[in-house]
Image: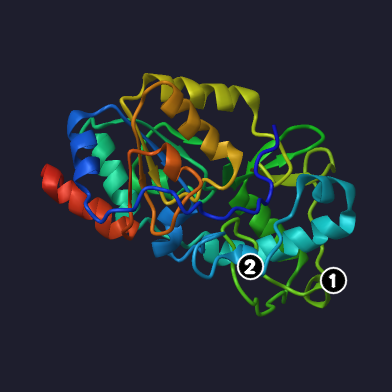
Amino acid sequence: MRMRPTLSWTPAEDLPPATTDVEPVVDALRTGGVLVLSGAGISTESGIPDYRGEGGSLSRHTPMTYQEFTASPQARRRYWARSHLGWRTFGRARPNAGHRAVAAFGRHGRLAGVITQNVDGLHQAAGSEAVVELHGGLDRVVCLSCAASVPRRELARRLEELNVGFEPVAAGLNPDGDADLTDEQVADFRVAPCSRCGGVLKPDVVFFGESVPPRRVEHCRALVDRAACLLVLGSSLTVMSGLRFVRQAERAGIPVLIVNRDPTRGDRHAAARVELPLGAALTTVAERLGIAVA
């Protein structure tokens, strides 16, 4: 199954109306056994843009596909130049109130797990444990030839040494850590090969057009089966990699709750969609449960 193709989707007119009442989320977390599925919207308050929300990067940016990355040295140069610049900002992002609330719910035993579609590592930085990174993480790099894995900070150091003086001004930053640069700005960028075998390095993330590893998908499906409720936070559910778990929950009779400021592709499968900013909504939920958000 393709990971996350860029899809055209228009909200249906017959969807149930959204609410600003967080009580359904409070009730679910009070009972416990809630499985969180998070998307890019939970990280916007940390300065990382969304793909599809207001001002989303898909309106100006076509993400790199796996096929393009593996087939073209020029595409890899463009990707690594843009990603190297974006990492400087992306790597400095810090968890916001939404991430901290999710971590607090976990510490108080209210969660059955956390699945994130994000690659930013902010759930873990906030203190959430056993987070399943559905699309991988930008803090790791893997060699496509020998499968060696190294920390992103190590590659960043090598790229700095190879590209002294590389300081272009980017037009914007995207949820995958990719900065917007022109072809002229990246033309002289030098790409670092694998230090072990000289092979092609790739961030340990699932690109558009690439498949999510089957074992990871099955692990997530098992988490859904054991959950008392699926709580979707900040995901448009436009792509099947996340939507399939919403559909699975509905088929199993597991209630689905969505907190997202805009309509989502999963609204028709949900018991309710709370239309509020994530940080404020989850902080309110925590307060009503008597849970302190650090």
Mark drawn on residue 95: none
Q: Are marks 1 and 2 in contact (CB under 8 Å)?
A: no
Q: Using the image, determine if residue 183 lies above or below residue 132.
A: below
Name the element at disc 2.
helix
> Mark 2 sits on what residue?
59
Mark drawn on residue 188: 1
Q: CA distance from mark 1 to mark 2?
A: 27 Å
| Nearer to the camera, 254 or 214 | 254
Count neighbours of disc 2 (C-alpha within 10 A) and say few if under 14, some if 14 to 19, many if 20 or more. few
Q: Is residue 134 visible?
A: no
Residue shown at the point (82%, 35%) measured from the top left: 145
Horizontal side of 174 relative to 143 (left or right) equals: left
Q: Position of residue 48 (x, y in %)?
A: 49, 62
Task: Kindly identify the amino acid type of the residue bearing the numbered disc 2.
Answer: Ser
Task: Kindly identify the amino acid type of the residue bearing the numbered disc 1.
Answer: Asp
Q: Quadrant of the N terminus?
A: top right
Q: Position of residue 234 (x, y in %)?
A: 42, 51
Q: Nearer the viewer, mark 1 or mark 2?
A: 2
Name the element at disc 1.
loop
